[in-house]
Each structure stands twice: as structure tokens, then as C-alpha cells.
Amino acid sequence: MIWDPRYECMDRAELQLIQLERLKETVARVYDRVPFCRELFDAYGVGPAHIREIGDIRRFPFTTKEALRDNYPYGLFAVPLKEVVRLHASSGTTGKPVVVGYTRRDLDTWAGLIARVATQAGVTGDDVAQIYFGYGLFTGAFGLHYGLERVGAAVVPVSAGNAERQVMLMRDFGTTVLVGTPSYALHLAEVAAETGIDPAGLPVRLGLFGAESWTEDMRAELERVWGIKATDNYGLSEVIGPGVAGECRYPGWMHIAEDHFLVEIIDPDTGAVLDCGQEGELVITTLTKEAFPVIRYRTRDISVLDRTPCPCGRTTARMRKVTGRTDDMLIVSGVNVFPSQIESVLMSVDGIAPHYQIIVDKNGFLDYLEVRVELTQELFTGQFRDLEALEVKIRRRLNSVLSLNARVRLLEPRSLERSTGKARRVIDRRVES
């Protein structure tokens, strides 16, 4: 099914005309109404008159998260506060939060974008969708809530926490769609099994997972334990929240709502725009946001673009599933390490639970990497010889992938903290100390 065939299956030449018209309006809005952006554009010698074709956006400066935080809370809003009907914010774990605002039209646009994402994934009006994202300043729960309602699904806004109650509601309400982080979905499967309920025996058939990076190996594990189709969707608070892109029935790539977002891939080191098919950092310009438009926002997310039509019939550009973030990359003893590499290794080893933590620290002047991973209940026999052999196996596989010697620490089942939000996979004590 396709939610909005006019825009999702549009001829690319026609789409680019719409993008250009909306880009002109957005740049003019930002220049006229946001003093910070006007001063920045003037410093670069650019303004609304310089947008004559889509490619002219490359002449404009990037917007960074630092600029958003420096203008906390409302400095980048393009409408008076009286026109803002909703406020959301990022977590602010590394400083002041980024505050984002929505007009009534923005909220209507957002619901429509989520309806596209949900329909792409396979949600219909017959579904019961259980949202276990936390409701609050985080954009995930509210964003998906209204879009799922627009599709016609019955929404269960259970919010975060109380895993036993979550499982009870799935069984009693006949939940068919799970909405939240993939890591917590695995925890819910654990809790169900501990209470004597086979997760795959519940009515759940589909997962709309997001808010954290996850590998294809984790997708396979989710589909195995739940007996579902696990889909990814993409968004970020600074742009609108969830709804920027989502997977169709052909997994691994997410359709971008190009009539609302102009996307580029850049070299994260030089800022140079890369061609389709080249991996780099995703940059997004909003085309329809009223309250909080952004020009060339650097997401820090690593992906690849593909503008060839999809077998599903949609013609919009697709972005490859995000493999990591430029600010997630760890440099350990001069070696570049992405958490996704470690996750792929761990998920390929039998007897390992899909819960792990990466610790980076210093021993004197030298970096060291420790990977803590839980065993499954079946493998946790207490036999030292078996555990030692497993530890050596994991260490060798990590060395093969990372070209780095990592310590491996095997933990009892349920040793690591479970989170309803983004799982804290990495602890870099070199930064925290």
C-alpha cells in the first residue's frame, strides 16, 4: 500500500520543481524572520535571491547542533511564540537541550509523514499499535501516535516502563504492532519468556523500531524471537522528529519524504557534497516546516543515498539504514571503531544475548577496549572451560574485524541495565574522567 501516491510516486523532474519552489520559500522565511541565520547568510554572501536551482543550496552554510543550542530556547524560531502550539526538546545529555516548535500546520504535516512511514512498513487500519516510547519532550511517542491514528490504527499509548504490564497489554489488547526502540523490544521478549509467554505466540506481527542505531543482525534476532517483520524508520528532533524516512517491504533502505526534506550526503571532514552511492554524513534542509525550519542541518548520521526507483513503486530517494554517527566513532589506540561493528560480531556468536556494553578507558597512557556481553540462560552453565573458550572465540572475531585486541567480559543474564529509551551502549571513561 502507498499512503500518498501523488508525492511518493512522483516523476523526479516534477518533484524537483516542487522542491525548488518550497526551498525558495523556506530560505526567504529563514532570512526574513531568523536574525541569527540572516547574519550567517550575509557573512557567506548568500540570500534568498541566490536560490535559482536546487544545487544552489550548496552555497549556503551548514547548520550545526551547536548553533541550535547557542540560540536556546527560541532563537531560531521563524514564527512568534503565539503561533507555536507544541514544544519538544532533545534530551540535553551533553548540554542544553535543542528546543523545537510546531505550528498547527506543522503538526498536521508531521501526522501525514508518519502515516506514510507506517503504511510503508505495512500498518493498516486493522492494527493495534502499542507505543512504549516515553511520552514527553522526546518527539518519538507523540510523533508516531498521531500518524498511526491517521492511518486508522488503534493506538495503545502505554508509554515507557513496567515491562510485565507491557506484555500483559499485548496479550489482552491483541497488540499487532510494536512501536519503540529495538533494544527494549528484545527486553520485552525476555520478560514475556520469563512469565511463561512465548513472544512469537502473541498477535504482534510488525515492529516500527527507531531512535537508536541497530544492525541487520539485531533485525534478525527481533524477527526470530517475536516472529514479526522488524522495520526501521528515521527522523530527528531538530528536523521534525520521526517521519523523515522509513522502510517499505524491501528492507535496508528507507524512503525519504523528499517533498518535505531536501537531502545531501557530504564528506564529514571536508563538507564536500558526495555523489549518490557514496557513504557520508546526511545533511537535511526542511522544505515545509513553519515554526522551526533548518537549512543544511548536519545530522552526524552516516548513510548512503540511492535515487533509483524502488521495486515497491515509490520513486523517492532512499537512504541506507544508518550505520553509525560521526560523533559515535571511537578512536582506540589510533584505530577507528564503530559500535555497529562490535554488535555485528556479538550477534553472530551463538549463546550471546543481544545486550552488551562497550567500555573505553586508559591504562596509564594506553587506551584499552572492553566489551561486556551477557550470556543466554542456556549457555550460563558455570563451566569455566566453556566460558573461557567462548571468551577466546569472541576476542578473536573482534580482533579480525577491528584489528584491535579487546578484552571480553562475559556476564550473567540480565546483568546490564535495560532502558526504555536509547540504550547506553558506549561508556568512554577517557571523556568522563
Image (cartoon, helix red, strand yellow):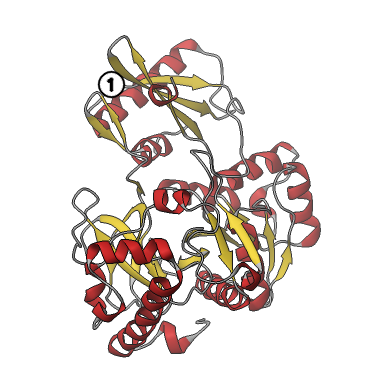
Left or right: residue 264 compared with residue 166: left
Left or right: residue 277 compared with residue 26: left
Indicate the position of residue 45 as horizontal and vertical percent values. Answer: 22, 68
Q: What residue lies at 51% left-to-right and 74% top-to-bottom?
A: 290
418 up-or-down from 119: above or below:
above
Left or right: residue 92 compared with residue 405: right
- Where on the picture, by quarter, is residue 341? top left
Of residues 17 and 27, which is closer to you in this image?
A: 27
- Where on the picture, by quarter, is residue 15? bottom left
Indicate the position of residue 190 as horizontal and vertical percent values. Answer: 64, 39
Indicate the position of residue 149 as horizontal and vertical percent values. Answer: 68, 73
- In what element is the residue under mark 1? loop
Could you tell me if residue 429 is visible in this image?
Answer: yes
- Quadrant position of the C terminus in the picture: top left
Of residues 184 and 288, which is closer to you in this image?
A: 288
Q: What residue lies at 45% left-to-right and 34% top-to-bottom?
A: 350
Q: Looking at the picture, which amino acid does disc 1 mark?
A: Asn
Of residues 368 and 376, which is closer to you in this image?
A: 368
- Where on the picture, by quarter, is residue 273? bottom left
Circle 1 residue: 405
61 up-or-down from 47: above or below:
above
Q: What residue lies at 28% left-to-right and 74% top-to-bottom?
A: 307
Q: Residues within 10 Å of mark 1 (few under 14, many from 20)?
A: some
Indicate the position of residue 136 as horizontal and vertical percent values. Answer: 67, 53
Could you tell me if residue 353 is visible in this image?
Answer: no
